[in-house]
Image: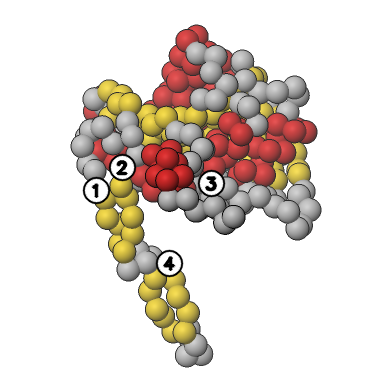
Amino acid sequence: MKFLVSNDDGIFSEGIIQLAKSLLPLGEVTVVAPDIERSASGHAITMHTPLRVKKVRLPGLDIDAYAVNGTPADCVKLGIDLLFDGKPDYVFTGINRGSNMGNDVLYSGTVSAAIEGCIMGVSAVALSLLYGDQMDYSLAGKTAYKIAQRLARETKDSGLLLNVNIPNIKEEQLRGTKITRLGNRHYTKNYEKRKDPRGATYYWLAGELTEESMDDNTDIGATANSYISITPLHYDLTCYKMVEKLKNLKLDLD
């Protein structure tokens, strides 16, 4: 198998190094990732400035790795187009430092990088480890290995897109895996108004987290109850249930 690996935490982050090491026993791994942290960059791509690529060496890994001064989506697009030898079998992204659940998937660079893989015809998996006092990526790495192994054996679906969230617990505390839907996570009081030392007003994004839909069938509820959450996604944003209703409204401008 051939894997293209990316993230939004930056190419030297602990999570991406763990991910590359975990997938390496299954085949060829190439890393193309942002040169610095690009968290919450969503699906932005670079259009008006040049992209620069630098080949780097990752600690403990003898693989091709490229740092790009662009977004996660840039990295996957450029990786598949030019930097990867041939075409990857899978795009794996992460392991993100912190969860990507509920509405947050719309902001996540890690999830967007996986979506870009699907747009380019490659099945993709985004992995995230929930925050904790200690960030031990070993369980998330094992999860990535098992998912890749199972996908290679049981599915050839080129449109597959999975969002995986791993609870920050010890392996012996894990209760299993749940196939889930996205929960409802949003923020209130998003910005704090502050004054700089010269008395000028500025605003700092903060926000108070509100989570709903906490049953085990959601990503939020499953991880809260010590399950790994696997949520199938797709990038078609069409609201199909509204198509016929809008047709009946006769909104044409003739």
Which callout, 1 or 2, points at the residue further toward the start of the chain?
2
Which mark, residue 212? 1
In the image, 92: left or right of 171? right
Q: SS of the residue at dot 3? A: helix
Marks 4,2: beta carbons within 8 A: no
**Visible residue check, residue 135:** no
Tell me: residue 240, above or below residue 29: below
Q: Which residue is under mark 4?
A: 205
Report, in whole angstroms, how far the alpha carbon at label 4 lies from the one at label 3: 17 Å
Marks 4,1: beta carbons within 8 A: no
Which callout, 4 or 1, points at the residue further toward the start of the chain?
4
Marks 1,2: beta carbons within 8 A: yes
Which mark, residue 160? none
Within the image, what quadrant is residue 193 found in? Answer: bottom left
Q: Nearer the viewer, residue 2 or 123?
A: 123
Report, in whole angstroms, how far the alpha carbon at label 2 lies from the one at label 3: 19 Å
Q: Which residue is under mark 3?
A: 109
Q: Residues within 10 Å of mark 2 (few under 14, many from 20)?
A: many
Residue at the location (22% across, 42% down)?
A: 214
Which callout, 1 or 3, points at the residue further toward the start of the chain?
3
Marks 2,3: beta carbons within 8 A: no
In the image, 14: left or right of 74? left
x, y percentage for residue 99? Answer: 39, 43
Circle 1: residue type:
Glu
Outermost residue to the bottom? 199
Residue at the location (47% across, 10% down)?
A: 154
Which mark, residue 183? 2
Circle 3: residue type:
Gly
Marks 4,3: beta carbons within 8 A: no
Q: Quarter of the image for the N terminus: give it.
A: top right
Q: Residues within 10 Å of mark 3 (few under 14, many from 20)?
A: many
Within the image, what quadrant is residue 124 found in? Answer: top right
